[in-house]
Amino acid sequence: SVPAAVAAGLSSGARHGLLMKGGAVMETAAKTTLVAFDKTGTLTEGRPQITDVVPLHGDTATLLATAAAVEMGSSHPLAQAILARAEAEGVTVPQATGATTIPGRGARADIAGETWNVGAPRMAAEAEVLRDTDRATVEGMEREGKTVVAVFTADRLLGLIALRDEPRADAAEAVAVLKDMGINSVMLTGDNPVTARAIAGGLGIEARAGLLPEDKVAELRDLAGKAHVMMVGDGINDAPALATAHLGIAMGSGTHVALETADGALLRDRVMDVAGQIRLARATMANIR
Ligand code: ADP
Ligand code: MG
């Protein structure tokens, strides 16, 4: 049976949207020494906005229309932003077939018999369509904390689209409060190292970037060997990572999806609630000792 103090702690948390699935979770949360945050949708708003549309061949409308056609079937936040902009500008989106997504990298589809890719500039570099001048353009935008997406075929780069996903208003303060509590934080992301460092620098957090979904799991396994790790993610595409940490906490509006795999959830879109949840767990466990 759950001691009364734990039951009281669980229900007190629940009143503020800090959910924990029972006393064992509470006990583990109290021991947290490291919080691993997913970047997109957790430390950031998860709603990237297009900041730059850079056509290298043809015009802006063609670039947007091609990107939108390829992203049509993708639910990725970058795809959503591109589709929204194409619609807002009223461009005519061509018909694409055979659309597929490449997790952590991009999307691909055929348009008028040609295969198009929309994804990380690294993909374009691997296809050998990214020139040195393009690379410099990409890096300049990445240093401003923007994520750059390349639109290309096997033999040409049509253009670049830059997007910026703003950090949540309380993210930097939450990292500082955790530090005061003796808890380190690290940011895990599939985004490139330059963009990741620009965002992380503003938050006072260390970044591990360029991680494919399976790399996040490996990284967490490594961290969990050295610390008591709480992983905080939006739970939409990070369920394996949430399951690998000592504790997996889903944060924000997507949490109903994740609660099946997560140990707890933070129902308000506040990074500060991570500190609140650990503080509550510590106070509750202190009460029953
Ligand atoms: P995060 O860890 O920030 O959630 P993801 O693993 O979802 O990032 O994606 C990593 C990178 O892969 C993105 O920064 C982007 O460059 C690229 N990418 C992934 N999916 C898409 C997509 N549908 N369209 C364009 N780029 C994508
Ligand atoms: Mg993600």
Image: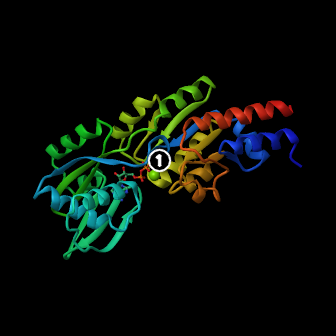
Q: Residue at x 67, y 50 (%)?
A: 263
Categorize mark 1 by other alpha carbons within 10 Å: few (<14), some (14-19), many (20+): many
Task: Give x and y (percent) for residue 111.
Answer: 22, 72
Q: Residue at x 54, y 54 (%)?
A: 254
The amino acid sitting under disc 1 is Gly
Q: Quadrant of the C terminus?
A: top right
Question: How many numbered marks are there?
Answer: 1
Q: Horizontally, is 280 left or right of 197 in the view?
A: right
Q: What colouring does the structure picture have?
A: rainbow
Label 1 beta carbon within 8 A of ligand 2: yes
Left or right relative to 28: residue 196 = left
Q: What x and y, as percent, mark residue 178?
A: 59, 29
Q: Residue furthest top?
A: 180
Q: Position of residue 120 (x, y in %)?
A: 31, 52
| Residue in front for this viewpoint, 37 or 192 | 37
Residue drawn 50% across the image and 44% down it? 42
Q: Position of residue 215 (x, y in %)?
A: 48, 50
Q: Which residue is mark 1?
A: 41
Closer to the camera, 129 or 88? Answer: 88
Q: Residue at horizontal 50%, vertical 33%? A: 170
SS for callout 1: helix
